[in-house]
Image: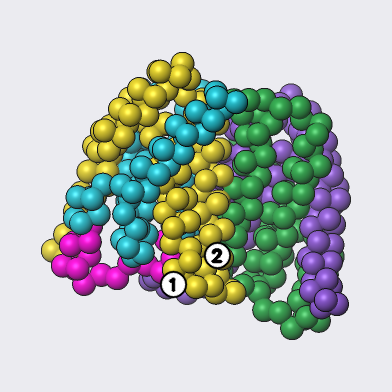
Chain colours: A cyan, B purple, C green, D yellow
Amino acid sequence: MEDYQKEVDEWFKEQHWDYWEPLAITTRLFEEGGEFARLVNHVYGPKKKKLDEHVQDMEEEIGDIIYTLICFANSHGINLDAAIRKSLDKVVTRDKDRFTK
Amino acid sequence: MEDYQKEVDEWFKEQHWDYWEPLAITTRLFEEGGEFARLVNHVYGPKKKKLDEHVQDMEEEIGDIIYTLICFANSHGINLDAAIRKSLDKVVTRDKDRFTK
Amino acid sequence: MEDYQKEVDEWFKEQHWDYWEPLAITTRLFEEGGEFARLVNHVYGPKKKKLDEHVQDMEEEIGDIIYTLICFANSHGINLDAAIRKSLDKVVTRDKDRFTK
Amino acid sequence: MEDYQKEVDEWFKEQHWDYWEPLAITTRLFEEGGEFARLVNHVYGPKKKKLDEHVQDMEEEIGDIIYTLICFANSHGINLDAAIRKSLDKVVTRDKDRFTK
């Protein structure tokens, strides 16, 4: 993720853009998450559609969510690789606990 | 809210519709919330727009969220008046506690 | 809903509270929606739990979502009864169209 | 992201876990997004708190969101690097269009 974070950061600097304020980025995350939700409901909800026509759109929505998170992370000096590492370790550890008990 | 809940319920019965399954309604709530978020960001986010052109749209998005909640409530036998009552009382009580301490 | 809106409004005036800014209320809506989502996943997700132990909690989460919407509506002069009316009419109309075509 | 996706996939296989169904993952995304929103409101909302005490928690919430997306992507054969690439290119292209007009 480091390369993506750098790329976005350089792009923002080049364009003299500021990152949005945190509440606006969070609202944007809600919006992007909502678009993803619409798509999932469209395919898997009450009136099921064929998945393969929509995998590309899903890819796009997920990309937009992660881009939003990159913007937030960059404006807070958060290293996303470290963030992901921690979450993965949590899953593994949580599970190990469960099995040793 | 009782009248609205009844109206929706009668309408669903008349049309022989089933309420969606809970995970699909929740995904729908995410979607509707996301549309509301987009509108709020559009008006109050980085590139501010005039509010008065969008109040009608906001009304509509909020209505859709509440409609989604009515569907969930109806499919779970939840009385929305009781639900709202409880939340309002919480605010009042929480506050009273704060002032008497 | 008119009575609930008035009650909240009077309470805020009495306490000399201001409504939060729109982006903060939207972020709050995301938070409250997320709590509702957690509960739904807890009951209907991969490790199903008994519903009846959690209907009360669901009622509470839905109440909190609607309370958040009341705050937003009040700070924007939105009449929630009109908002709900419009959404219900949309469902009915959408459906009628479908059947007459 | 490829390495993270592989790692999660191998872990799930080793544990004989199935990925959750799409509506449950989406509901989970709502939940994780909501936890992130709570934290942002806590720091930047009406009653501002000091940021530096909470950057670690933010990192954690963002990691959890991305982990949720990894699970969804893995269960749909979506390559997250391609997804991110596409979103970044969109930002760049969108911007170029704006300046050439």
**Which residue is pictured at 44% across the width and 32% down the height?**
A92
On the rendered structure, is C1 left or right of B53?
right
Magenta stretch containing residue A14, yes or no? yes
Residue wearing tag 2: D41
Q: Quadrant of residue C12?
A: bottom right
Q: Main secondary structure of the magenta part?
A: helix
Q: Closer to the camera: disc 2 or disc 1?
A: 2
Q: Position of residue C77 (x, y in %)?
A: 67, 72
Q: Nearer the viewer, residue A93 or B77?
A: A93
Magenta stretch containing residue A16, yes or no? yes
Judged from the image, the secondary structure of the residue bearing numbered disc 2 is helix
Q: Position of residue C86 (x, y in %)?
A: 68, 52
Q: Is residue C33 above or below residue B72?
A: below
Please state which amino acid type lies under the numbered disc 1: Lys
Instruction: Please report, as a chain letter, where disc 1 is located.
Output: B
Q: Quadrant of residue C70?
A: bottom right
Q: Is residue B98 visible?
A: yes
Segment tinted magenta in the rendering:
A8-25
